[in-house]
Image (cartoon, coloured by chain):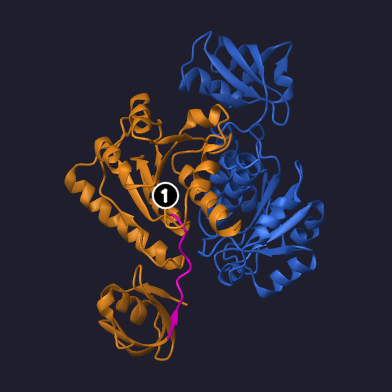
Chain colours: A orange, B blue
Amino acid sequence: MQRYFIDENSLQNDIVTITGDDAHHIATVMRMKPDQEIICTIPGASTVRCALTNISSETVEATVVEYVENTNELPISITIASGLPKGDKLELIIQKGTELGASAFLPFQAARSIVKLDEKKGAKKVERWQKIAKEAAEQSYRHIVPTVFAPFSINQLLNAIPDYDECIVAYEESAKSGESAQLVQTFQSLKEGSKLLVVFGPEGGLSEKEVEQLTEKGAKLCGLGPRILRTETAPFYVLAAASYHFELMR
Amino acid sequence: MQRYFIDENSLQNDIVTITGDDAHHIATVMRMKPDQEIICTIPGASTVRCALTNISSETVEATVVEYVENTNELPISITIASGLPKGDKLELIIQKGTELGASAFLPFQAARSIVKLDEKKGAKKVERWQKIAKEAAEQSYRHIVPTVFAPFSINQLLNAIPDYDECIVAYEESAKSGESAQLVQTFQSLKEGSKLLVVFGPEGGLSEKEVEQLTEKGAKLCGLGPRILRTETAPFYVLAAASYHFELMR
């Protein structure tokens, strides 16, 4: 069943009203007919299954058939902080990371990031990234759309650490030295509803200074198994491991 | 340190001889100089750290400095069977799946695969997929290059199931119905050295008949958490969960 995110004002007295791109999608792309059903989610609040009543490419109306329970979110909230990588790698991180349950994406300008975004370019990118997150969230039955932050400086990232219950840094040197217990320990220490920040370097890795600054702020260095993962693959590992730990093993 | 795969004849009396593309890479792309060190791996056998002695773009020679222990392979061997997906998704599965530790990739012509490969096209594709696996294996410090099979028919896949200790099928309906224990149970039942086959449908999923045929042969249906993963994302989940289970939690 097609799924759409709506804002809270779009659901009134068990009637859902959809406008804009999503109305166009339902009427023109999907060519849906009255009585066909869709799922609508108010991010972080209700999800309803509803039957279409009026359809035009400007406005679509639907009547609620059922309120659906929200059980698709990871029990802990994970923010993926990525040192700005090259090309369209962050798009892949956001698309797949959303499917795998990330709560937020926080790109940051790392010392070894080759890409530099000025404010104007940055704003355009963030808009595109948000769109990717929204589409992936709909497709993967998420109940929230992950937040994509505008790129942080390293200092902004360091200052954000106290907002989270734990912060870990995926560190290639930890992987090489066989460190294997930190991720398990961190997951074991977190309760439902906890907020975890996970920091990944860009292609060239984090600089020694960045690692020092992060650990001074309480971040823990963490290996992700013995194989060296690319900057865009490592977040998938952490998110899948979190799902395995918190959703499948309990 | 740069890593290269070599065949067993390339290591004789502690001297490594490298020819072909890799010699070109060392001499011309990396512009390495005598005394610089590289890592060479005979897949499934030894790994050596060695110092370059003679360098030309046709032949490179190096002297062994140290035999390195092989500890980078997942304790169980996982074969990823993917219903042929559209576009270049299988390339992504092979690249990232190799980083994450897969032993082999087995594409198969599923009922809902939109792509059809004839023998000639198929052979070209397999060559390209093998190259991607080799490069990803070098980059992620693997000790083997995963095998990429030429596409199987569904019957060939069914007949291959008895060659594995366990076979699981990532099944969207299991995810929707909240099935969450099968993957954990399967991992718990496997010993070091076991062979696991994991089957993934193409974009449209497996057909009911395929699911029936697979379960008749002993395959178990398996959910991968409550979110719906795309066909190219689901293998990353299984491989990361396997690493978490077998490498980090032990």
Whether A68 is among the magenta residues is: yes
Find residue A115 and report its image quarter. top left
Q: Is residue B156 left or right of residue A242?
A: right
Q: In x, y percent, where is residue B183?
A: 66, 57
Q: Nearer the viewer, residue B119 or A97?
A: A97
Label 1 chain ID: A
Q: Quadrant of the C terminus of chain A?
A: bottom right
Q: In x, y percent, where is residue A129?
A: 32, 54
Please, is residue A247 above or below residue A218 in the view?
A: below
Magenta stretch: helix, strand or loop mostly: loop
Question: Do we see residue A117 in this rendering?
Answer: yes
Residue at image x 30%, y 88%? A13
Residue at image x 51%, y 53%? B88
Start-end of magenta stretch: A66-76
Find residue B204 and report its image quarter. bottom right
| Residue situated furthest left in the rendering | A120
Q: In x, y percent, where is residue B173?
A: 60, 71
Residue at image x 53%, y 42%? A185
Question: Do we see residue B108 in this rendering?
Answer: no
Per the image, the residue denoted by label 1 is A93
Q: Nearer the viewer, residue B171 or B136?
A: B171
Q: In x, y percent, where is residue B184?
A: 66, 55
